[in-house]
Image (spheres, coloured by chain):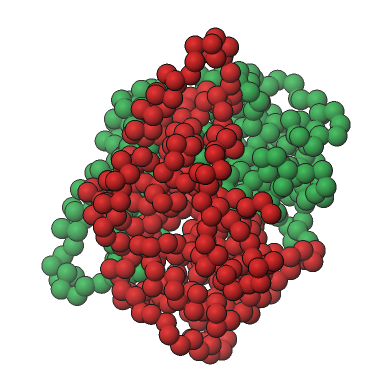
Chain colours: A red, B green
């Protein structure tokens, strides 16, 4: 079902020298393909786009840090800027993880804001927050960029969208002509909790996806980023047993404290994590995506022939010191 | 993208009396629709098809039980029978959870079988196991049953299959003419670990899906059931840091012991859990599936217009005592 990638794979296969073809070798796995990428195919993520969230130490006294990459333009920039505002006001310090709903989301924020088990007044919001509209769940004009790139990583339609792409480092979906585009709710993506429409949320309440992609939330909530390190510290938290997976009154002790959230560029240089992602417009990513859709490494018997946009996660790694 | 369901929804909408239409009400959520099902739409799961897996108590001394529903014919019946054989030989008693790979699988079995960190000899297998072939990953003849049902819950194609269905209580995919069908790797489904082809696994090593549906495993591994209760006891386990998410040698203490696995029909009647699922061929399921694909309850602004087969989980509940 992956268009163009199959064609690319055919070209690559034909370009293997005859000598090499005589001795059949195991096809590389997606990870092996990524490991072969040229250094120039890796793109550094700006420190301004990384958040470092420190949770309380675990029961064994081990430090738990989660690193979030914020989403670049043209998506959700008002909320992204609000999140930097919250972090710089230290507003997130001492909030808690309040909701862990299996196969759905982990959500953190002020326990007294929009929580069935609230016991006090919500803390006041910082100055300077932007108010975003529902139209901002979508971005326009992306088709011009996509067209210029020759649709290198266009995937087939899926039940949720006319087209899906992995574009500029992110999973996105579009209408048939790509006039409107939106990011997709894949595992590990981070979104902005909100109340009923027309509320669009400020960024005070955030969640990440810990199960099957809840793509029905696409275009209904702002996605603002994804977890790039430490996902397990959220995904393995004990599940909540109140409504919607919130921790109930009698399990308030399960709420994990969030000690601090900082924009990486605000940290002393020695503490600043550095990450890079594999360019989604390069040859290696095209080979990787094709291999995800058509597994030919030794374990597999029948290649799927396609892959969901949420099953082609963008390779991201720490930059070696 | 859901065919027929939309048509059904249109019929249902038209059938609302004019008086009721004058006062617009919030559309029911998928769960509210399920709560309205007639008792006759719930089907009891045979005790022979339920496994009760008891894990060691958690750190707080709380009991942890996981209930697995085994898959009915025509799928994977050789492996399913093997699993009953393992359970009845008490072979699974005192095995451990050896692998927890984030956004992928939790796997349990004999730590000395096919584990990078094995330290001893694998335990001998019980007598009477069937050896299954790769052709058994697929079932034939289902199209006759599907045709008879009028394709009530046929979903659109997705990147992995020509057609997907929720049929006879299970998520399945088929080729274009439904001549061959196979179950799909959705969240919570249980499969049989295996070595490289032509090995197909015995049922000694089992895993469940804890992330985005790894549909590339469809047709490559036997699926034998799904978790119907206690999923959180597996999905929230600490992640492993060895290769493929196996617990590394220095985290062997994270392996959760499995105290026992019993076929429910072998338990004393008082200990036998009873479960029922919502018939996937009834009117309520059709409305539920349509509502999952087109959320109209108050939180939503834009209905997705479709749903992945793994995003329409079959409602399953305990039978009230």
Total marks shown come to 0
Compared across the picture, whether A100 is left or right of A233 comes to: left
Q: In the rendering, at what x and y percent does residue A219 appear?
A: 33, 61
User: Compared to A59, does B192 lie above or below?
Assistant: above
Nearer the observer, B315 or B309: B309
Query: For this view, does B294 lie left or right of residue A311?
Result: left
**Residue at coordinates 38% horizontally, 37% vertically from top-left?**
B159
B89 lies left or right of A106? right
In the rendered view, would you say A88 is above or below B275? Answer: below
Looking at this view, is B287 or A320 the one in front?
A320
- In this rendering, is residue A97 above or below A69? below
Q: Residue at x 31, y 68 (%)?
A: A136
Q: Where residue B200 sits in the image (x, y, percent)?
A: 61, 23
User: In this view of the protein, can residue B183 be seen by the observer?
Assistant: no
Residue A232 visible in this rendered orientation of the protein? yes
Q: Name the residue rendered at 15%, 73% in the picture.
A: B22
Q: Is residue B199 above or below residue B146?
A: above
Q: Quadrant of residue B32?
A: bottom left
Residue A187 image offset from top left, x and y in percent: 50, 53
Please identify the residue farthest to the right as the structure is shown: B120
Q: Residue at x 59, y 68 (%)?
A: A264
């Amino acid at each position: 079902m992956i268009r163009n990638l199959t064609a690319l794979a055919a070209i690559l296969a034909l370009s293997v020298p005859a000598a090499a073809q005589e001795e059949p070798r195991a096809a590389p796995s997606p990870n092996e393909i990524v490991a072969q990428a040229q250094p120039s195919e890796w793109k550094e993520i700006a420190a301004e786009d990384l958040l470092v969230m420190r949770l309380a130490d675990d029961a064994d006294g081990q430090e738990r840090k989660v690193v979030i990459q914020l989403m670049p333009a043209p998506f959700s920039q008002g909320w992204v800027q609000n999140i930097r505002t919250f972090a710089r006001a230290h507003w997130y310090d001492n909030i808690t993880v309040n909701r862990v709903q299996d196969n759905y989301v982990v959500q953190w924020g002020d326990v007294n804001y929009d929580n069935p088990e609230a016991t006090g007044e919500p803390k006041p919001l910082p100055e300077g927050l932007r108010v975003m509209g529902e139209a901002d769940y979508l971005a326009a004009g992306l088709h011009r960029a996509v067209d210029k790139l020759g649709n290198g990583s266009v995937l087939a339609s899926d039940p949720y969208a006319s087209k899906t792409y992995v574009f500029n480092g992110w999973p996105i979906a579009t209408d048939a002509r790509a006039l409107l585009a939106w990011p997709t709710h894949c595992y590990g993506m981070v979104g902005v909790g909100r109340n009923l429409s027309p509320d669009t949320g400020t960024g005070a309440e955030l969640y990440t996806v810990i199960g099957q992609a809840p793509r029905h939330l696409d275009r209904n909530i702002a996605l603002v980023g994804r977890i790039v390190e430490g996902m397990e510290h959220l995904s393995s938290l004990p599940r909540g047993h109140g409504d919607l997976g919130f921790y109930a009154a009698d399990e308030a002790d399960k709420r994990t404290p969030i000690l601090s959230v900082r924009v990486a560029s605000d940290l002393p240089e020695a503490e600043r994590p550095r990450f890079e992602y594999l360019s989604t417009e390069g040859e290696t990513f095209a080979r990787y995506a094709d291999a995800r859709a058509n597994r030919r490494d030794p374990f597999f018997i029948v290649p799927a022939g396609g892959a969901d946009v949420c099953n082609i996660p963008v390779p991201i790694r720490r930059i070696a010191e």
